[in-house]
Image (cartoon, helix red, strand yellow):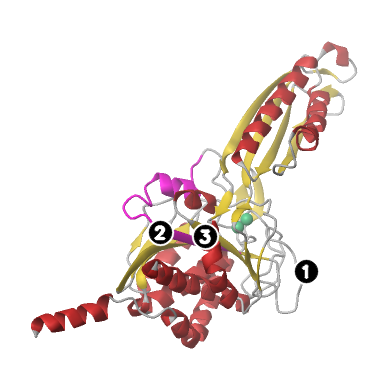
Amino acid sequence: MKQLILIFAFLLISHPISADALKTQLDLDLDGVMAKVTDWRHYFHENPELSNREFKTQQSIVQALNEMGLETNTDYGITGVTAFIRGQNPGPLIALRADIDALPVTEKLNLPFSSKVKTTYQGNEVGVMHACGHDAHIAVLLGVASFLSKNTDKLNGDILLIFQPAEEGAPEGEEGGAELMLKQGLFDAEKPDAIFGMHVSNAPHGQIWTKPGPFMASAEAYRIVIEGKQTHGSRPWNGVDPIVVASDIVSSLQTIVSRRLNLLDSQAVVTVGIMKAGTRNNIIPASAFLEGTIRTFEDSYADQIRDEIKIIAENIAEAHHAKANVQFKVYGGYPVTVNDEGLVETLSSSLSLAANGDYYEAKVPRTGAEDFSFFAQQVPGLFFYLGVNPPGVEESPTNHSPYFYVDDDALGNGVKAFVNLVDDFSYIYNNQ
Ligand SMILES: [Zn+2]
Ligand SMILES: [Zn+2]
């Protein structure tokens, strides 16, 4: 008899519960969850912090998770927070990731919770704003955490919450972001079976989209310093003009994508974003400075582009009796964000359901980059986008704009998407 009771108890405890237990519960709880998500979002929006400086943000996330009864860990990343939610039923370990940093952008929205924070960034006084919407990412993941931590009886397996700092890039000379968290061993003790991440975007209200395979570009900065010879602006023959050299280099860099890469294989972008030289109209300066970004969807393309930049810069400089020093990955770099094709195929219906059918798979990747890519190199990953325009608005300012606006109500689909992904992935995992 005792044995029978034990077996019965085992079945009750360990048998995976139905496929839709969490989804069904969320339908009942969504209004309550969203009230909290909105409060959190407004708080984080009003209190933005730059990459690797998210100290108050970290504290607030820890406090919110502790109030849910979750134990937190702040060992990963300079200002990261991680926590486990242990389900009462067997199943996979699923990682859910939100990035938490803001940008040196002076907010121009006039909301009751608009940011008034100011800081010094690279020597300039600037505002700080959650202009990329990471405030929404924190709030949505906290909402998901509060819901899941209350419903561990319906959760198959475990959740690893990752609140990741410095997605926008650590300050020069510092490490940060997903790469640092992994380097510090985030996945060493317990390796997730899958990882999911979301980004908000200026797209129709509540719309969700993703893409199997390469979804977002690799990104890295390069820098070229041209050493000429300073002289009087009236006697250029006595010096070596680095401005003319830099101009030639900038023009020739345009031929990398247009003339040197096979565009039938893949695409790339080579941009010069900074060109600086000189102090006065009648002085030919000693040096000139260029910095730019490289975007690709294949790592081998980035190798080829680096080679071409070096050949162009060094040889043009030499032809002008100048010297070019070329440096790559000035601020590190992000690999291509590749979505696991199997995950997208099996879970597209979970995302579509979250978006009430307003879901699509993009045909082409985006040239923006994401350091979610580092996580997705370690475990199968699925990254998706959520449109956060107000209802009925098609066009609105893009991420990183001082006018970037997040409609709170659109975030409900983000909460649903994460919960659906957890519900469905764990069910499929347990029944495969
Ligand atoms: Zn951004
Ligand atoms: Zn972002």
Q: Mark 2 — residue?
A: 193
Expressed as whole percent of the image width and height from the top left, the position of residue 64 reads 41, 71
Task: Specify the segment rendered in magenta.
Answer: 174-199
Marks 3/2: CA–CA distance: 13 Å
Q: Residue at x 69, y 43 (%)?
A: 266
**Disc on the earlier residue, 2 or 1:** 2
Q: Quadrant of the N terminus?
A: bottom left
Which residue is more in the foreground, 324 or 240? Answer: 324
**Disc on the earlier residue, 3 or 2:** 2
* Number of numbered discs: 3
Expressed as whole percent of the image width and height from the top left, the position of residue 287 reads 73, 24
Dot 1, how many residues are within 10 Å of its Cα: few (below 14), some (14-19), or many (20+)?
few
Q: What element does badge 2 sit on? A: loop
Q: Mark 3 — residue?
A: 342
Q: Residue furthest top?
A: 238
Q: What is the three-letter code of the residue carrying label 2?
A: Asp
Establish if 260 lies above or below 341.
Answer: above
Classify mark 3 as within 8 Å of ligand 2 or not, answering yes or no. no
Q: Mark 1 — residue?
A: 395
308 left or right of 356 in image: right
Q: Can residue 337 be seen here?
A: yes
Q: Residue furthest left?
A: 1
